[in-house]
Amino acid sequence: MILRETGAQARLVVILLVIGWLTVGCLKVGPNYKPPPLATEGTWLEAADQRVSTKPAEYRAWWQAFKDPVLDRLIDSAYRQNLPLRQAGVRVLEARAQLGIARGQLFPQTQQAFGSLVYNRLSESAPDSVKSPQVSFYQSEIGATASWELDFWGRFRRAIESADASLLAAMADYDSTLVSLTADVASSYVLIRTLEKRLRIARQNVGIQRESLNIAEARFEGGTTSLRDVEQAKTVLASTEASIPTLESQWRQAKNGLCVLLGLPPQHLSEELQGPEKIPAPPHTVAVGIPADLLRRRPDVKQAQYLAMAQSARIGVARADLFPAFSLTGTLGFVSSTLGTASLGDMFQWQSRALTAGPGLQWNIFNYGRLQNNVRVQDARFQELLLAYQNVVLQAQQEVENSLVAFLRSQERAAFLAQSASAAMRSLDLAIIQYREGITDFTTVLTAQQSLLEQQDNLATTLGDISLNLVGVYRALGGGWEIREGQPLVPPAIQEAMASRTNWGKLLQPVNLVAPVEGQP
């Protein structure tokens, strides 16, 4: 439609713009997200235990319950330096930019300025109907064009819903990475301290067994015992010494794993681990709240719901393709040429203006079911994510129950092993005295030595298991991600590098996304 009257042009443009704004928000096809039913119990299976508290608790810095300054330093360093956590932070920035793209679709999708200067030469052999007195001329034009597809069916608004939920899912993924990071650092630290204790026990037993070997050799040289006692003592001693390289290897590997969590190449970590070499002691009680708390706190549970919300909106995006798309298109420019009495200098005069404006319609027909099947694909994916969300909730409760029962039972096991280790030490002392006096044979001493090493090593391992299981409880409860609140998702150095390459505007500033999760208490 080409308009030549200025008043009609203005009126039509205004009418079309009003119609466009009025139609936005009228309809929004596709389902609105509804959370699925979630299976949660009212309390934990171990809630009756006096060591378990179901009162609400703060898990922002749960590792401080161990009261170990070395552990506090390690987690702080990992939070500032861990590379996978930085990757998760950059993914949030990517999702923020994707949301900006989706929001931009609500406005005219095509906005272009154009200009050209063209030389034309007509053929002298052209038919008389197209011949011109001038065989060649110049033509120039300048202007702007815009095309706006109206969001009549809510396709773009659904896309914004999806991008918004995807951003929240990316933030939840960052929080989940942070929960895993804090738990992994604590687990690695507990494992290192446990191996150090086991190494001390092995070396102490090597000393005890050397003394027994000396006694056996002295009695053999004195003719009061046989060479068999000496060889048996050497066998037990060598066996204990052989366990030390294995423990040292495990100790070094645990430290190497901790280095990676800290964003460092493998090193001794002498400065980072400087402090009391003891297994972090857990508190007497642990606060676990109620199972429903997991829905509000665990990042992976929230992430599963946000992913389902994003996919629900994509159903509406796909369904909107089944309906006609309405659009407004307009072009305003100035055109001039050297034909006749005109000149290029006339281009900027008002009479040289050219305006094209009007509505348009596009409808995908005869698509052989492709669009409807795409709707079905998106719906099936949505159902998959709903089931995945329900399963994540079940797994979260399982992880808490498993870690909690392991924490409680390992405490009971440690109490029995402490009694066993004490009894084994007394038994060995008596066996050595009786052997010196010739009351018992050396086999009794060897059996007592092996039993002492076994019970002491089991006790050290179980003490480490208690702390590891408590770390597992806090991991399963989803604690620790709160420390990022108000902090940048990527460190300043990375922000500067990204800003030097691209204009990120305000997207690099700290973000604290808080959105209610539907269907959760």
Image (cartoon, grey):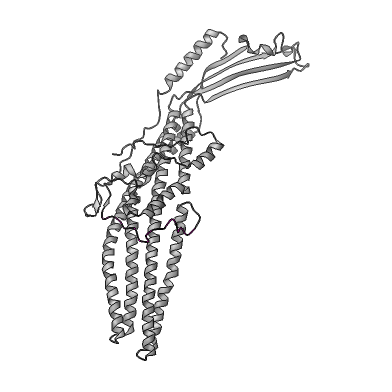
Residue range highlighted in magenta: 267-284
Q: In the visual, does 117 lie left or right of 435?
A: right
Q: Residue furthest bottom?
A: 223
Q: What is the x, y in percent for residue 444?
A: 31, 81
Among the 4 quarters of the image, the one containing residue 408:
bottom left
**Count of picture labels:** 0
- Find residue 11 and report its horizontal and vertical position in percent: 49, 11
Q: For residue 459, what is the image quadrant?
A: bottom left
Residue 388 visible in the picture: no
> Is residue 372 found inside the magenta-colored segment of the image?
no
Residue at 32% x, 47% y is 59
| Quarter containing the N terminus | top right
Q: Nearer the viewer, residue 383 or 454?
A: 454
Quadrant position of the C terminus in the picture: top left
Outermost residue on the right side: it is 124
Using the image, determine if residue 147 lies above or below residue 255: above
* 268 in the magenta segment: yes
Residue 275, horizontal then vertical, whole percent: 39, 58
The vertical placement of 391 against 508, above or below, is below
Question: 247 or 112, which lies in front?
Answer: 247
Which of 146 and 191 lies nearest the eye of the viewer? 191
At 61% from the left and 22% from the top, the residue drawn is: 114
Magenta segment's dominant SS is loop
- Looking at the picture, does residue 108 appear above or below residue 67? above
Say which quarter of the image contains residue 277: bottom left
User: On screen, 459 above or below 300?
Assistant: below
Q: Nearer the viewer, residue 428 or 294?
A: 428
Task: Tell me if residue 409 can be seen.
Answer: yes
